[in-house]
Image (tube, rainbow, N blue to C red):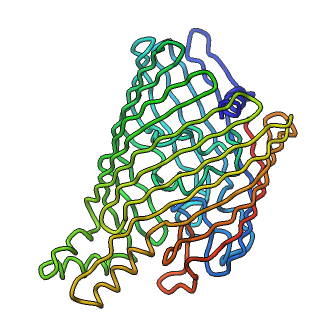
Amino acid sequence: MKHYLIAAAAAAVCSAAMADGPEFKFSGFGTLSAVHSNSDTSDFVGTIFQPNGAGMTNSWSFAPDSKLGGQVSAVFNPQWSAVLQVVSQHQYDNSYNPFVEWANVKYQATDKLSLRLGRIATPSYLLSESRFVGYASPWVRPPLEAYSVLAITSNDGVDATYRSPIGNANNTFQVYYGTSTSKIPGGGKFQAHPGWGVNESVDIGSLTLRAGYTSVKLDTNIPSLQPLFATASGASAFFPELAKYKANDWDLSAVAVGASYDPGNWFVMSEVIEFKGDSILSNSTTWYVSGGYRFGSVTPYVTVGGTKSRIKEVNTINPLLNAGFNQALYSTSATQNTASVGVRWDFMKNVALKAQYDKVRTGDQSNGRLRVAQPVSTFRTGSNVDLITVALDFVF
């Protein structure tokens, strides 16, 4: 994977330096992508924050993956620097209004220790720092099973990173703390207060190993679930087991481990995320494995992955309550499996053309990561959905 990250980082940038002043650099990235889904009862979306996508809304859609971003970096002296990143992509309100993804100041305290303050990428995955930069990865998108588990991509807060060599390896240890607010379709929002985490990565030549822990205290405002939460609150005096189904103070956590090996001509990578849910979100295990081989400028690849939710059904003496809560538990679960094949063609400098086919199978009684009509859906759970994506990724 380093092959693509180095290529992206080495892309031509426009820079201007002030005499005896800070040095500024501008770089940008983008994806123009079209996705086709054969489902007429669900939409494939690129993130949980998108209201619609490819499928029942439009059989072909540019919405799931298309985006444009720009980044300005400033270096004031060897100790102080800053970065601002702005991204435009399909949003909760069906717009493409730009939003600030990064805006932070960095202090290089020593040659090993750095501190950042501001809006910082949430370091949940192997590709957290580059998840919006399609050119930096072989696929048309990072595997959604994994990269949708912890969907909040940035925090407003602080982080500290300590880098040190250990024999032939380079070790990076990072801790962070912050808050975030994300709006979702239907007039709702998520608010993390706080989110924190710790992760460790080790680079040994072409091999990268990573392990991390994330914890989030989450408040929610999800209009479609408010009646369910109100019912739980009213009935919990008689059925104490329903008290956990609440809108606020969700205690969520995840352990993520990953590995990537990229000697140049080929690559293989994998991540596993063990998620601990609360309230209406069930515990789950998510994984993927991906590999490809580079034949000059052409890179075919395959990816398989899945999410398995472990749902603990409600079992009171009231069958109507049981049915209502269990339906909600299954409908909000993300159980699905995906098999993908694709190809990347680097046909010119800083530009890559990609094509990918995905076969998604949702779990029994689960919509997977697909968006379905509310409040009444005709989507048949436990079914297959075929996706075809063509994407043009670029950096500048």
Q: Residue at x 52, y 32 (%)?
A: 209
Judge by depth and name the residue closer to the eye, 307 or 1. 307
The quadrant in which the N terminus is found is top right
Q: Image quadrant of residue 207?
A: top right
Q: Residue at x 21, y 87 (%)?
A: 317
* Above or below, comparing residue 342 to residue 318 in the picture: above
* Above or below, comparing residue 136 to residue 163 in the picture: below
Q: Residue at x 53, y 52 (%)?
A: 287
Query: Can you give x and y, in whole percent of width and height, for residue 382 in the image?
Result: 57, 76
Query: Can you give x and y, in whole percent of width and height, for residue 82 in the image?
Result: 50, 27
Left or right: 300 with respect to 310? Answer: right
Query: Can you give x and y, in whole percent of width and height, for residue 24 in the image?
Result: 61, 23
Q: Can you name the residue that lies furthest to the left here?
A: 237
Query: Can you give x and y, in whole percent of width and height, for residue 309 in the image?
Result: 43, 64
Judge by depth and name the residue closer to the eye, 250 or 99. 250
The quadrant in which the C terminus is found is top right
Q: Image quadrant of residue 232?
A: bottom left
Left or right: 109 with respect to 296? Answer: left
Count of numbered labels shown in the rendering: 0
Left or right: 243 with respect to 146? Answer: left
Q: Residue at x 56, y 60 (%)?
A: 91
